[in-house]
Image (cartoon, rainbow, N blue to C red):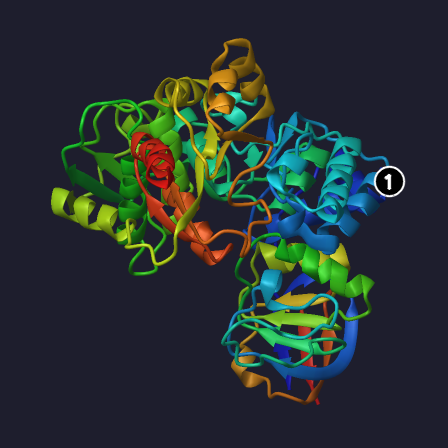
């Protein structure tokens, strides 16, 4: 299956999905030194976003959360790509400064958790095998 | 794929291609990226920037790493840019009980910003220290209280930028034209009629904070983004608008409100038919809601969120003349304002009372988590962050009441 969305940041990635139902607040919600979701009451709390295709509806919280994505990348713990239903400035700016492929305007409920997919950030295309 | 129609000039394209350095390329990627998300057609020049994301308590090593890498590239701001408060008094941090490791990292943050050409004003009230845009001026500000003040009181045009996007705007001298940069997005959507009676005075900052919270929460209840036209507010001082702007931004996420006699552009828009009323009873209820019975002993007081004006410092000096406080009591303000207060003799009177100036910082961004139990303040915004960020109970009272409580405390202890 192929899903067509909008390019937020270019780059190609292939990996396993981690699908979150809830929004992510990168500032305070992700531990930048472990890559683990620590956000209170989050549906994927305790799981690592490192080297995953991270899928969540939209970002929230403080705008310094963009720097958390940069720090994750420096630590080798960034997601391989990010897919949103609707991207907002915190996630977009984080992907731009950390150079993480990012696509939005994707019906994320059509993507299963734990499956392998391809992301083409440049063209905004998601391919589910 | 939905194509963006964002067009760039030759110099903007050159920045994006990396022809003018790596830092400028990253900055332009941020501006263009946001422009595409919000379907801007072009970039526009800006004249002023306010950069948030300064306290090491918020930035952490993540932000410090990024800023130092950016500064290494040699990029400089192309327009005047000022900084939000830091996590400490940059000179007198020891007196505030700031750990040395924190201070070292905080000073590295300031160094990186200085290298990038951002002026280290370290205040949330740039409009009080010379970064004062005019009506119709396009600017790129972060710091939600200042954004609201700039749009609504000064009539400048800014979106609610994040720290990184404001810095990107400063480095490129541009922002994408969307949101509040376009007249059609600035019209009020709901009329708010105030049926309240406030006491006379010019330092009713706590009551204006309550009104900001009340209006902010009420009009965004349905999850809608509204722009209120507010009617029935009495004449108010700069200090009261500053408190109101901070509160309505904190509790309602607003970046713009209109008041007929104040907001420069208010009269150019039609009055929205949809009307909501705020009653005296609601005002009193909301005030009481911010004055909870505090379970722990009050061990901290803070005035200056947003940063105190010179006139507020004068007022406080008059109130504390000859009195003593024994608990930790901070006045937070810009260094430039404090320097004037020094010259005028206000600082001496205040410091003799035992109250400390915490310059360059504030009770929202300083590393205060679990350091105190309960605080009194005149700021509705500070009450919000005391609980959510610093695990601190808070009570909202007038400046006079806070000082009275602080000085009373000594008498009861004697």
Q: Is residue B147 visible?
A: yes
**Foreground of the two, B130 or A6:** B130
Q: Is residue B238 left or right of residue A107?
A: left
B349 w.r.t. B362: above or below? above
Q: Quadrant of residue B112?
A: top right
Label 1: element kind: loop
**Foreground of the two, B63 or A101:** B63
B48 w.r.t. B302: above or below? above
Q: Is residue A123 visible?
A: no
Question: Which quadrant would the N terminus of chain B be assigned to in this image?
Answer: bottom right
- The residue located at (53%, 30%) in the rendering is B356
Residue B299: percent from left, percent from top = 44, 46
B251 w.r.t. A4: above or below? above
- The residue located at (68%, 66%) in the rendering is A102
Q: Is residue B87 left or right of residue A96?
A: left
- The residue located at (71%, 47%) in the rendering is B102
Q: Quadrant of residue B255?
A: top left
Tally of numbered tags: 1
Residue B166: percent from left, percent from top = 62, 40
Residue B404: percent from left, percent from top = 32, 32
B287 w.r.t. B156: above or below? below
**Foreground of the two, B298 or B334:** B298
- The residue located at (69%, 60%) in the rendering is A68
Outermost residue, top direction?
A: B344
Q: Given the image, what chain letter belongs to the residue carrying mark 1?
A: B
For the residue carrying disc 1, how many other residues have a C-alpha within 10 Å: few (<14), some (14-19), or many (20+)?
Answer: some
Question: Circle 1 is placed at which residue position?
Answer: B73
**Foreground of the two, B398 or B96:** B96
């Amino acid at each position: 299956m192929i899903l067509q969305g909008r390019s937020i940041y270019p780059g190609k990635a292939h990996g396993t999905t981690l699908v979150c139902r809830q929004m992510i607040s990168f500032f305070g919600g992700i531990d930048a030194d472990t890559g683990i979701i620590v956000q209170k009451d989050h549906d994927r709390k305790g799981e690592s976003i490192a080297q995953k295709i991270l899928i969540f509806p939209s970002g929230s919280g403080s705008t310094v959360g963009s720097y958390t994505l940069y720090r994750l990348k420096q630590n080798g713990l960034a997601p391989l790509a990010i897919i949103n239903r609707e991207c907002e400035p915190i996630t977009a700016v984080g992907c731009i400064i950390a150079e993480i492929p990012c696509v939005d305007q994707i019906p994320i409920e059509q993507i299963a958790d734990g499956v392998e997919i391809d992301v083409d950030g440049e063209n905004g295309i998601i391919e589910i095998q | 794929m939905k194509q963006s129609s964002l067009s760039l000039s030759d110099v903007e394209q050159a920045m994006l291609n990396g022809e003018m350095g790596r830092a400028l390329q990253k900055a332009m990627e941020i501006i263009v990226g946001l422009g595409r998300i919000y379907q801007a057609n072009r970039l526009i020049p800006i004249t002023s920037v306010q950069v948030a994301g300064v306290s090491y308590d918020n930035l952490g090593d993540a932000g410090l790493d990024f800023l130092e890498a950016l500064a290494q590239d040699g990029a400089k701001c192309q327009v005047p840019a000022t900084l939000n408060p830091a996590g400490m008094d940059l000179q007198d941090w020891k007196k505030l009980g700031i750990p040395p490791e924190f201070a070292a990292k905080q000073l590295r943050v300031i160094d990186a910003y200085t290298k990038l050409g951002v002026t280290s004003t370290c205040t949330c009230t740039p409009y009080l220290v010379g970064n004062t845009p005019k009506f119709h001026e396009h600017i790129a500000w972060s710091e939600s209280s200042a954004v609201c003040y700039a749009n609504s009181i000064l009539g400048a045009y800014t979106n609610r930028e994040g720290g990184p996007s404001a810095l990107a705007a400063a480095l490129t001298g541009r922002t994408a034209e969307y949101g509040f940069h376009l007249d059609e997005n600035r019209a009020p959507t709901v009329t708010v009629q105030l049926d309240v009676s406030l006491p006379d005075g010019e330092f009713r900052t706590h009551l204006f904070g309550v009104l900001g919270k009340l209006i902010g929460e009420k009009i965004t209840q349905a999850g809608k983004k509204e722009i209120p036209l507010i009617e029935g507010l009495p004449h108010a001082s700069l200090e009261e608008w500053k408190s109101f702007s901070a509160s309505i931004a904190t509790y309602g996420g607003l970046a713009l409100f209109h008041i007929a006699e104040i907001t420069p552009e208010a009269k150019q828009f039609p009055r929205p038919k949809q009307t909501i009323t705020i009653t005296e009873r609601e005002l009193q209820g909301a005030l009481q809601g911010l004055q909870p019975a505090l379970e722990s002993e009050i061990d901290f007081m803070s005035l200056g969120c947003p940063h105190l004006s010179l006139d507020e410092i004068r007022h406080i000096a008059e109130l504390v003349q000859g009195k003593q406080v024994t608990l930790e009591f901070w006045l937070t303000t810009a260094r430039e304002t404090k320097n004037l207060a020094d010259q005028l003799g206000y600082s001496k009177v205040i410091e003799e009372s035992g109250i400390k100036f915490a310059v360059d910082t504030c009770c929202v961004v300083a590393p205060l988590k679990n350091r105190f139990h309960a605080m009194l303040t005149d700021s509705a915004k500070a009450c919000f962050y005391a609980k959510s960020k610093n695990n601190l109970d808070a009570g909202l009272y007038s400046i006079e009441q806070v000082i009275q409580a602080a000085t009373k405390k000594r008498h009861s202890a004697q």
